[in-house]
Amino acid sequence: MTPTADVFVGPPIQWSSLSPMLILLGVAVVLLVAAALTPRWPRRTYALVAVGGALAAVVVAVCLWHGRGLSAWSGSADPTTGSSDPVRFLVGGAMRFDAFALWLTVIVGLAVALSVLVTDDYLEREGLSRLAPEIYALYLTAGLGAVVMGMANDLIVLFLGLEILSLSLYVLAASHRRRTQSQESALKYFILGGVASAVFLYGVALIYGASGSTNYTRALAAFVQNISPHRSEAMALAGVGLLLVGLGFKAAAVPFHMWAPDVYQGAPTPVTGFMASAAKAGAFAAMLRVLVVALPTWSADYRPIVWVMAVLTLVVGSVMAVAQTNVKRMLAFSSISHAGFLLVGVEAAIHDTTHAHPGDGVPSTMLYLLLYAVLVIGTFAVVTLVGRTGDGATDLAGFRGLARQRPVLAVAMTVLLVAQAGVPLTSGFVAKFGVITAAVGEHSYALAIIAMVAAVIAAYLYLRIMISMWVAEPDAADAGREPVGTPLLTSIVIAIAVAVTVVVGVAPGWLISLAQHVR
Amino acid sequence: MEHATVGFPILTMLVAVPAIGALLTAVVGRKRPEFVKLTALLSSVLTGALSIWLMAAFHAHDGGFQFVSKHPWIRTWGISWHLGVDGISLFLVVLTGVLFPLVIAGTDPHHDHRAYLAWLLLLEAGVMGSFIALDLFLFFAFFEIVLVPMYFLIAGWGYEQRVYAATKFFLFTMVGSAFMLVGIITTAVLGKAGPNGSVSFDLVDLANHASFAATTGRWLFFAFAVAFAVKIPLFPLHTWLPDAHTQAPTGGSVILAGVLLKMGTYGLLRFGVYLFPEAARWSRPLFLTLAVIGILWGAIAATMQSDLKRLVAYSSVAHLGFIVLGIFAITSQSATGAVMQNINHGISTGALFVLVGMIYERRHTRQISELRGIQSVAPVFAGVFTVVMLSSIGLPGLNGFVGEYLVLIGSFLTARWWVVVATAGVILAALYLLWAYQRVFHGPVDDANRGFAELRWREAAVLAPFVAIVVFTGIYPKPMLDRIEPSVKQFIAHVHDATGYVEPQPAGEGAP
């Protein structure tokens, strides 16, 4: 819209629909202000406030989910999608508000809450409790960034979300002040992430040049209307490519994954779990939105690229994981391999844009993100405990004898690893089954088979960790190691992760039906 | 015809009882270690009793699925909890029900009984489930879940190379499963066999309503067949088996040979050939050839082994070759023989592994060269070994003969030259087993073997049921055949309906 008078008229703002984000931001600000102005709060209070904020965002999102389609909130229905679930545009078309955005909010909110709980015990163990409020505030803002990425309906808004997320993560990665690896990983992440952001921004500029708008809806309309003219084709394609690079970097898709193992290994372990869950969720949500909603007219051009990226990510992630001896590095590559599975879902979602009847690409990818987030946070919570004071004992040897020392913890880790490997009756299998079904539904048989075979290679790495825990004989050096502690909050997180893994594995029906609304 | 049912969901119980038993064993054992074995034994005996009751209540001469229970599970994907047995799966269920209590009673792990028994019971639940599942998703879930307890049994309680063997077993099987999972999903998505053309994973719906283009069907069949070929194992995908068998603890080997391998042959019949009869007929030459190569290769490799357990493992490769031969000959006789051989191999090879386990416990070696003259110090032990060995060779009057004979007779009509070669495998079986027997049991006893203890009562009690089944089935197979044949006939009729295949009948005198 163009302002007609000298007075600038802002777009209408739908506060209720934005409330989950406002809650995340508000609690972050409260924490920062409180840390600066008030004396230290009692132990665990900061964590409880942060968790409360994240869960409040989840609860509000769930309420909004149930209120979808009601006239309680304003906005305009989207005429372009035939979905029964209406899409509403907020803030003058800059954001989309629909089931997809709410689903992402739930993933991110849960990831923030669980990560904060693990982090609280971690900070206490490492003697860093002084940093608690700032770190929790950063978790919340990172979560906010991830949600914005998924809700954006404008490339500039998406870029804002990306930067909010990334800047928070850079600081989080460096948050263990005494570990040089932590600093090193943050610096690496910052430099490479900065380059990726620049590339992404260049892509935004080219798309703007080709279509005349950064808004998804208007860009799509522009591409649809003059699809043939040679004026914009090269520019648009270059833009699409650069956007893919930027988003592929955040999603840790091969060949833009180089940062992931180093950063995952160096960052404080709870932060690693958060990167693998919330940051990944934001990146994939943004990728789905950009590719499926904004640029479907170019799908024939970028689908092969996504296909190749998916195959590379699957194969490189799985094969490289096997060659590692540090569990955090292994899980970093395993998370790359999971990104490959997510790309299988994305590839199916891209196919969906070419025909009227929507397939399962988007819902299955979003379901995967939810289940994987819980799984991976639980797994890294166990690694946090096994890492012991100093966060250093994360090589395979650190897991030796865990079954004898902490049998329940070993059983929990086994369940989580088996689920990551995709054994039936676990949530990991449900997630994999979903994306493979979506791929097969779009006739991507080769990709489905490559993905499953890659899963077998990756299974070897989970077996290695299990062997370390259950079978390997204790070494003389192990006697001197500090025993693995099981503090309360972390134990709760692991229990929740295991419970979700098993319950969803046995009775996934309700969750799958819910995910069907996510388009 | 009225299908047999009983007042409660007996098939669900067959899966639930061992699963709950596993949980109880794990929980009870933490506080009261003395009850571990009792809990495990009771749950497995209860499962066994249920399976025998199932056999008693089963209507002979009814070829359809009986005791069917079907409840929706994941509606969005058309997946249901669908269980049922027919003549093809009935005796596999009974075999599973009988073998597990014997293994739990008869073999002891060296350490950590609680975890060992819990894993065994979980394994039983998975195996039971895969034999009675009539939904592709459900079958796959059970088929895969079995890997986890078996992996831990081998890796935790096996011999020197156990971690290597367990990992190899896990990864080999999982590669096969990877193809099958994609195959299953594709079958369901393309088949659209549910009500109103929705996606359904139901075996019966898919077999009756789905039809695939010839090429599609062949691809799908191969996706299934790879998984089963690894599991069976079919040459050349068999290399995991000797390692897994040799390194597994005795109980693990018995279960592996007795029932786990049968998941492959059973799956091939129930899900491979049944869903894709056209593709199965088309690929007959390939599978017949692989089966025959397996028979010969297994036999020759077994002859060359110096390790008694490895020898028995390779003999499994040969025996399962006969089963695959019977399946792909596609006549009612050969398929009946294959189903029979499934059971008989489970009994006789299971018993052989128990006996080899006993030898190892006494002598702490499995090397044939270090054993000799045992017959003179332990004649009863040798006698039992002889009976079991002869059943494995396929001596008339013992159970091994019935299945092998039916397979060879039945296949001769449709796969004459393959049978001619396969028959050599029967002779080779006599060669490697008798030769091994001769080296281990005959000859003058040396000092090392002089102390070889005679069969104890507890061991005799474990072996008695094996020997009883071996002799009974060998002399009077009719009750089994009565229950197997109707289902096999119906199976062949299904192949006929789907592909127009006419089963050749044995030519009478004077026929052209």
Image: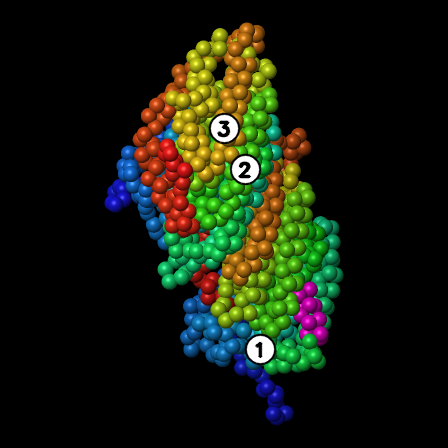
In magenta, the rendered stretch is A234-246
Q: Is residue A165 left or right of residue B420?
A: right
Q: Circle 2 is placed at which residue position?
A: B289
Which one is in front in this view, the residue at disc 1 or the one at disc 2? 2
Q: In x, y percent, where is residue B326?
A: 45, 36
Q: Position of residue A60 (x, y in %)?
A: 47, 67
The image quadrant that residue A215 belongs to is bottom right
Closer to us: A55 or B471: B471
Occupied quadrant, residue A224: bottom right
Q: Is residue A465 visible?
A: no
Report helix, strand or loop for mark 2.
helix
Q: Say above or below: B188 vs B12.
A: below
A97 and B362: which one is in front? B362
Chain identity of mark 2: B
Name the magenta segment's main secondary structure: helix
The residue to which callout 3 is attached is B423
Q: Are marks 2 and 3 on the same chain?
A: yes
